[in-house]
Image (tube, grey):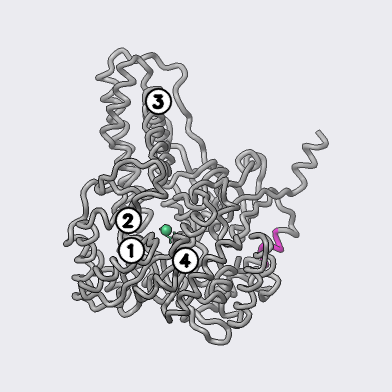
Amino acid sequence: MLSETLLKTTAHTLHGIGVSAGAVHGPVAVVSTAIGVDGSEAPSHDAEADSATVKAAMTHVAEQLKERADRSSGNSKDVLTATAQLASDRGLLKTVTRHLQNGEGITASVHNAVGEYAGKLQKIGGYMAERVTDLYDVRDRVICELRGEAAPGVPELKEPSILVARDLAPAETATLDPKIVLGIITEEGGPTSHTAILAAQLGIPAAVKVSGIVEAAHEASELALDGGAGTVLVDPSATEIDELSERSARRTALLSGSQGPGLTKDGRPIALLANIGSAADASKAAAIDLEGSGLFRTEFMFLDRQDAPSVEEQTDTYTRVLQAFGDRRVVVRTLDAGADKPLAFTQMPEEENPALGIRGLRLGMRKQELLDTQLEALSRAYRATHGDVWVMAPMVADVDEARWFAQKVRALGLPKVGVMIEVPGAALRASRVLREVDFASIGTNDLAQYTMAADRLNGDLAGLLSPWQPAVLEMISFACKGGAATHSHIGVCGEAGGDPLLALVLAGLGVTSLSMAPKKVAAVRASLAMHDFSRCQDMAQAALDSSTATEAKNAVLALADPAVKDLL
Ligand code: PEP
Ligand code: MG
């Protein structure tokens, strides 16, 4: 009894992974979990009739999701549309019918059929495995529909609140209103999950993999979240709330003074660019105070497509993107298909180790018609707009590949050709690789994965995957030296580019641009503006001289303006 009272009156801290910066506090709203299979239901005696009932429920769920998709835009729209498609998937209904024919009850059939389907997706791994959350969302909605209950998920919020969920479904995250949702905390999920990406896009502070939060939230009346550090205070004290609010006010003040091009305090330019995945993203990002797009992940547009996009369709998209940015830079990456982002129309056989297999440019070299179509569309869009288009290949590993790609792009009259540096082989030999092209952009997500031999989608390996790992920084340093030796532009477009502290190290190592989720630009700009370039160089050296990721981060923090902490 005593310990219970103590627990209730003493704030305690839970730790997870911060995925969207910002400090907030407020009442808790727990996302209701699904009601599950009806334990008292009878076995199916008429599979055909029961299948028709399930079909009607699935159609209703698909329509509801589609309606929400129609009211949304950008990534949110894409996620909702994809989930609606899962809800009307004929293969799924067939699987449910098979279970009904086996005599299983109606909700049990839905549950078991989805389990079977999810197993298949998980086996494929990568992006497909991440769709499993969407599939479970469809399952729960259909079961609620069949049981005549309200859909599970986010409760109607009467006041601004912090949402807590085991793993918030992307379809739910996509439609959250940042005015009423103060923050998002999930017990599961990883930094590359849909929830994390969408939260950052919406600008809602968020943390994932916060162990114990669901249980704590049921007891707590208030939470305080630091979405940069990934820490959560359960029932914080008045003093703690005051500290957090002051920090939040300081952050807002720093961000509101952040304008114009990226510059260090002494005026060295570091271009600040947006990562985008569609024409809709482009028009949103172009409306923000930033200097262009440093990464257009073109494959994001086609993840759910069965047929290859035509040259006309792609020309139209690229033209719209170039028009949106006017005379600002747009770095378009050719399809980075394979591994965690399989595209059905590439018809590639399954691989034992897809992350080390035929992906990125390797696939483009083997399916040249896909690459040629895309490059033709890009050259048509360029001729139509005369935009500042830079064309870049993903997953380049050596000089031969860079040369092969550059020759293709230049033959079409496109003005700038570059490569991503995300394979250690390319980083180590960057000066040779860069002789073949005009620029390079470092993909820190994959560069960390391949340097540390740690699957980037595995939340358990987050420590090894940290871009603060000195070995990863050493790789980036090699790439930057290659950039300096060849007088080439060298940017960063992985998640590391959006970290206001790491951005200083990257600038000190010699990168000339940073590309990130558009909402992260203001904090990175404010951080650069607080530090001279020579200080950034000192920070880079201190990080390289460290033995561990934690040491590196602490060494850099010690050299940083103390105000930078308010941006993290
Ligand atoms: C990267 O690997 O850092 C990168 C930017 O590419 P993607 O995340 O799309 O693989
Ligand atoms: Mg990559």
Q: Secondary structure at mark 3?
A: helix
Q: Quadrant of residue 229?
A: bottom right
Q: Is residue 529 above or below residue 248?
A: below
Secondary structure of residue under mark 1 = helix
The residue depicted at 37 percent of the width and 56 percent of the height is 75
Residue 300 can be seen in this image: no
Q: Which residue is mark 3?
A: 112
Secondary structure, mark 2, is: helix
10 Å crowding of disc 2: few (<14), some (14-19), many (20+): many
Front one among 294 and 447? 447
The N terminus - image quarter: top right
Ranked by sequence position, the earlier of labels 1 and 3 is 3
Of the image marks 4 and 3, the number of the one nearer the N terminus: 3
Q: Is residue 462 above or below residue 485?
A: above
For marks 1 and 2 on the same chain, the one whose residue lies earlier in the sequence: 2
Ligand 2 position by quadrant = bottom left
Place of residue 350 in the rendered image (x, y in percent of width and height, measured from the top left): 33, 40
Please, what is the three-letter code of the amino acid marked with disc 2?
Arg
Q: Are marks 4 and 3 in contact (CB under 8 Å)?
A: no
Q: Is residue 221 left or right of residue 137?
A: right
Q: Which residue is mark 2?
A: 362
Assess disc 1: are there few (<14), some (14-19) or many (≥20) residues with their C-alpha within 10 Å of its C-alpha.
Answer: some
Residue situated in front as seen by the camera: 474 or 332: 474
Q: Is residue 245 magenta?
A: yes
Q: Which residues are magenta?
A: 241-246
Distance between the Cα atoms at labels 2 and 4? 17 Å
**Residue at point 64%, 77% (across, down):** 538
Position in image of residue 16 (x %, y %): 61, 50
Q: Which mark is residue 427?
A: 4
